[in-house]
Amino acid sequence: MKSIIKAIPFTVLIVLSIFAQIGGYNIGAFKLYAVIIGAVLIINMMLAVLLKVKDYFLFGTTSVAILGILSVLFVPLLGEVYIRNITTGLYIGLFIVAFFPPIFKMNPFTYQFSENNYPKIITQSKQFFKINLIINYIWAVLFAMAIVLTKVTYSDNNIVQTILAITVPLAPQLIIGIPATKKLPVILMQTVKGARLHFSSIKELFEAMPLGLNKKRSAGVDALIQFMLTGKEPANGYMEIKNQKCTYTDGIHKNPKTIIKCDSELWLKISNNEVSGDLAFMKKEYEVQGDMSVLLDLNRLFSNEKEEAKTIKNNESEEKFEYKKFGPDKIKNIVVFDGGPRSDKLSKTTFMVKHFCEGAKQADANVEYIRLKDKEIKPCTGCFMCWTKTPGECVHKDDMTDLRKKYREADLVVFASPLYIFSVTGIFKNFMDRMLPIVKPYMLLSEQGFTMHPDRFPELGEQGFVVFSAAGFPDIEHNYDGISSMFRLLDKHSENIHMMGEFYLPAAETIVQPFYKSRKDEIKEACHNAGVQIVKEGKVDKKYMRIISDTGFSKETFKDQANNFWESLEDKKSFLTEIPKL
Ligand SMILES: Cc1cc2nc3c(=O)[nH]c(=O)nc-3n(C[C@H](O)[C@H](O)[C@H](O)COP(=O)(O)O)c2cc1C
């Protein structure tokens, strides 16, 4: 009923303009129509007031019609102008309705239309208002276009002209305006920045979720989550994310991929970001069955860009560094120097390197894995005997003699060290210091202006190296500056060994938790693929480095999780039983 009331003035005016044109704009004949139509519009307005239809579109079109009818009845000169320009007048009215109210801080006229198609929680948001403002001005432009199009002469034939003068101005509205009003809110919800919605009930949350899906990030996601909520607002319903669309259905699905059993109040708090979902899960405050990987993604899938800025950024300087590329058939022999003190099972650096090596072996490279902690490596004495009295030989007779040979003979050297105090471990640094004998004491200047020592074994040709390092902090920037600078400088100040890639894994200790299984799998795959690629193509794509360095969660989430973990240990006997004194 309300839609009919809204449509009546517009339709009546269009019909009237046809009669006016067919009747040769005869004001005398038009007076009768004017009275009838005036009466219809007045009744329509009364009904609108009774049914509380608050609509600028209705007021705009009715006002234009009433003004026209009054002029036809009482000011014939003006009336004649009006009946010759009914449709133009109609669009002028609509343009005014679209253009002016927002300037005076009133709701955009499209608001009332789109309001009916979206849940209240969405329509009350600032994003939705902004979106409507955009659509509103699209309509203002369309109405301005229509004003012009009503004045165009399309044909000499009166009937053809009448039809075209009405249909042509209408066409852009039907082709652009109506689809834009329907589709744009869903599209723009993901791009217009705004505060996160705050849900006051589970009902609101589930109504809004399908509209809040971040299309870009949901590419390739195929999830079916069954919610079983208990407590204050019990609800059973399932959410399906597929083909970049999200749907929510009440009830129980026969075959969900993930089941979430949670207290409704807690789930609301998690959804409103008042409680960390990861943390609550780890505290066993809710239960998840089936594929848990989607949980890690939920926040990302339903978050806006502003929040994304809070997640850890990739190493920006990585973009600026030119990694060495050799091309196929270069990397055949690989040696790994792992400088971590932990066991293979515990070390996250080793985890990455092992998968890199498996990829390299699969591509037919020979790999030798050396654990520096098991080797005898005395610290450098700084005597420079390796440059003076015994060139190329160190005063220490330990495992380094063999390691130096392996180092210089490899096509690719893998430097692996956990991040210790923003740099490599002591074990690793000792090893690096003892590499001095492989260069000569003379000085060279590179083309880029870096001072270098000449290679003692240039006949062995150029080598590549890659770096792997796991860190505790979730930060890439600043945390990894030291280690990255060290290896970049090694690249710049070396004649024959150059860096092909850096693999930095922040927040490394989290990957063993079941919750982060999908991230662990991603890292494993990226390392493996990088290993295959370096052998097959003689280069490493940056995307593999990025996959490893992008945690996908915010530092805030990390902080909460870590603190919770340490707190959870406080009651345990083996931890924090006594406070050590310095
Ligand atoms: C002595 C020491 C120093 C550390 N310094 C840092 C550091 O500067 N930055 C950081 O993010 N993590 C630091 N960590 C944490 C480790 O990098 C983290 O535990 C990492 O997972 C170790 O790698 P791994 O698993 O290969 O042994 C340090 C750990 C230790 C034991």
Image: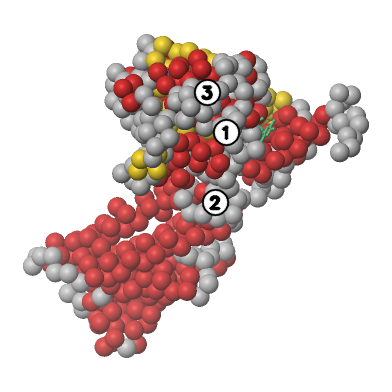
Mark 2 CB within 8 Å of ligand 1: no
Q: Of all residues shown, which one is farthest toward the left?
A: 156
Q: Amino acid at mark 1?
A: Gly
Q: Amino acid at mark 3?
A: Cys
| Separation of residues labelled 2 and 3 (CA atoms) | 56 Å
Compare residues 14 and 372 and report the one nearer the observer.
372
Q: Which element type, helix, strand or loop, lies under badge 1? A: loop
Q: Which element type, helix, strand or loop, lies under badge 3? A: loop
Compare residues 317 and 490 and report the one nearer the observer.
490
Query: Which residue carries the number 1 mark?
Result: 382
Query: Which residue carries the number 2 mark?
Result: 306
Q: Which element type, helix, strand or loop, lies under badge 2? A: helix
Residue 524: give x, y in percent of width and height.
Answer: 51, 21
Q: Residue at x 71, y 36 (%)?
A: 561
Residue 541: give x, y in percent of width and height.
Answer: 38, 31
Q: Residue at x 47, y 57 (%)?
A: 131
Give neighbour class at mark 2: few <14, some 14-19, many 20+ (Cα, 10 Å): few
Among the two numbered marks 2 and 3 on one chain, the one whose residue lies closer to the N terminus:
2
Residue 246: give x, y in percent of width and height.
Answer: 51, 35
Residue 394 numbered tag: 3
> Relative to 101, is 72 above or below?
below
| Separation of residues labelled 1 and 3 (CA atoms) | 10 Å
Give neighbour class at mark 1: few <14, some 14-19, many 20+ (Cα, 10 Å): few
Residue 34 numbered tag: none
| Horizontal side, residue 92 vs residue 120: left or right | left
Q: Residue at x 42, y 30 (%)?
A: 439
- Quadrant containing the C terminus is top right
Q: Residue at x 14, y 61 (%)?
A: 160
| Horizontal side, residue 312 vs residue 391: left or right | right
Q: Of all residues shown, which one is farthest toward the right?
A: 578
Mark 1 CB within 8 Å of ligand 1: no
Residue 412: give x, y in percent of width and height.
Answer: 41, 22
